[in-house]
Image: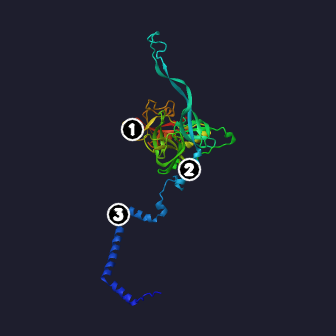
Amino acid sequence: MYNLPKLDINKTKNKTIKAIKSRNFQYVILLIIAGCIVGFSVTLSALHYFPLQTQAFFQYFKMSESELVKSQPPANAYTSNVSYEQAIIDAARNVSPSVVSIVISKNLPVYEQQWVNPFGDNNPLGDLSPFSIQIPQQVQKGTKYQEVGAGSGFIVSADGLVLTNKHVVSDNKADYTVLTNDGQKYKAKVLALDPVQDLAVIKIENPSASSGQAFKPVTLGDSSGIQIGQTAIAIGNALGQFSNTVSVGVVSGLERTISASDQLNSMSETLEGIIQTDAAINAGNSGGPLLNLKGEVIGINTAMASGAQDIGFALPINIAKKDISQVVATNKIVYPFLGVRYVSVDAEIKKKYNLSVDYGALVLKGPNGEPAVVSESPAQIAGIKEKDVILEVNGEKITAKNSTATIIQKYNVGDKVTLRILRDGKEQDITATLSSRSS
């Protein structure tokens, strides 16, 4: 066993007293006192000259750890509490049975090339001429029933209601077939086309409905709480041949306004309040669902940016909820209708038309000469004229991000609205009774 050295208390006491009386120790004490005085002075100066910063500094130490790490999102903002990869797998697995491919078929003319005399029986060289003029010409020879396109949709009710894009099922001369995830084929009937949004509701004509067979509907989410950066999952019939293709990205932007047209440029419309995503949306994905990590539908895939990569757009699902409920109740979609064509007023429009305001809706003719005010519409009955600027609807200001159409859609058919307009430099109020604009 080791022996510890003995401690001489008197010797230690003498060394301590000697150290305290030394000049070096006194210098150290003086430095400490001086440092405290300087620090106290600096603190008083900070409190006097930087009160807000100092208050924020002390407030920091009062906050709990969770408050420091966690920001304050909107009350209805989407949050995720599940494993990222597993959530994608679960969402795709659960929603895929509800996603359908929509095949478009119709009779198309069949042409063949024939050699014909352009003069018919009247040969300019005479009937006895050894020469005969023949030219090639495409001549129709009957019709052929064939597939002409494809899109996507998703089931929203157990009895087979399917939500899709209007441009997918807008041809009233075509037939539509729904292909489900389990390989079944069903004829489908177009019930209603949204007169304003690129939305449509079709119905699966299910021969087995009488036996009690039910389809699996999706779960509709709430698009009002979407946040930029949250995960977005797109499912659809990519390129019209790869059904239930899953792509993943994020919500890249909100409240976009775009001008969309189909591949043939046969129809074009302006869409407002659109979700932008970098989840791949290809031709054929139109009408498919855009999901969050919970597997809830937050949007309807609608368009892709031509000439760009990973820029797609989807209509918020909250817009479609009203359509679905109307179709269930009445088999049609009805919107309140004012009846004006307009451009949103901004600094450029203000300068171009020499206006006194930089907001509102300037009532103008369409690009092809369409009337600025629709005949016999609520706007015409109320007395709205071309070049009027509609400033407010029931006191709600019209801006580029809050258009006339967006505000009017908050009301119902038959509602009276007060329109504040600017005419010839003077403001006045007029009243209009909204009529119906149905599909």
Q: In this picture, is 395 found above or below 13?
A: above
Q: In this picture, is 357 found above or below 3?
A: above
Can you identify the residue that label 2 sits on? 91
The circle drawn on residue 125 is: none
Camera-side residue of 110 and 125 = 125
What is the crowding at mark 1: few (fewer than 14 residues within 10 Å), some, or many (at least 20)? some
What is the crowding at mark 3: few (fewer than 14 residues within 10 Å), some, or many (at least 20)? few
Residues at marks 2 and 3, CA–CA distance in whole angstroms: 56 Å
Percent coordinates x, y for residue 256 in the rendering:
46, 44
Secondary structure under tag 3 reads helix
Q: Earlier in the sequence, mark 1 or mark 3?
A: 3
Residues at marks 2 and 1, CA–CA distance in whole angstroms: 46 Å
- In the image, 220: left or right of 6? right
- In the image, 199: left or right of 356? right
Q: In this picture, is 3 found above or below 387?
A: below
Which residue lies most toward the left here?
Answer: 23
Which-is-in-front pick, marks 1 and 3?
A: 1
Q: Earlier in the sequence, mark 2 or mark 1?
A: 2
Percent coordinates x, y for residue 155 in the rendering:
59, 43
Q: Which amino acid type is marked by label 2?
A: Ala
What is the crowding at mark 2: few (fewer than 14 residues within 10 Å), some, or many (at least 20)? some
